[in-house]
Image: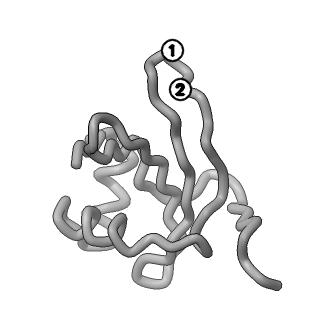
Amino acid sequence: MRFDERAKNLQTMADLNLLEPDVAEILRKITEDDYCQGPLKDDQGRPLEWWVFGPSVSGCCVYVKVSLYRGKVICKSFHLPEWPMRYPLRMK
């Protein structure tokens, strides 16, 4: 897994008392109920498709944006959401 160490990602990890291996484990446990959006084209023209999920972590919703590239997971975002998350596959 490649993890983007942006300030808001690191702050969320600190707030939730998580280490990078914890994030990898959370990503492994994502289900279709956590799905929010995707695939989304890469905004920098790279050959990537991004998927957005909103799993619950320690009672908090976390905005997760990931891509698969050459068999590896790239985690661009792992932070508290900046807007309400929508879950189109969840049963009401």
How far across and down, in percent of the image, does residue 43 sit?
A: 56, 22
Front-most of residues 59 and 65: 65
Question: Can you tell which mark lies on residue 15?
Answer: none
Q: Amino acid at mark 2?
A: Asp
For the rendered model, the colour scheme is: one colour
Establish if 75 lies above or below 30.
above
Q: Which residue position holds label 1? A: 45
Q: Which residue position holds label 2? A: 42
How far across and down, in percent of the image, does residue 65 sit?
A: 48, 48
The extreme right residue here reads 92
Residue at screen point 72% across, 70% down: 89
User: Is 51 left or right of 57, judged from the image as shown?
Assistant: right
Residue at screen point 56% across, 52% down: 52
Q: Secondary structure at mark 1?
A: loop
Q: Secondary structure at mark 2?
A: loop
Q: Which quadrant of the structure image shows residue 33?
A: bottom right
Establish if 31 lies above or below 52.
below
Residue at screen point 56% across, 65% down: 54
Residue at screen point 63% across, 46% down: 38
Front-most of residues 29 and 20: 29
* Contact check, label 1 and label 2, Cβ < 8 Å: yes
The extreme front residue here reads 71
Q: How many marks?
A: 2
Establish if 21 lies above or below 49.
below
How far across and down, in percent of the image, does residue 9 sit?
A: 36, 50
User: Is 60 left or right of 16, judged from the image as shown?
Assistant: right
Establish if 71 lies above or below 52.
above
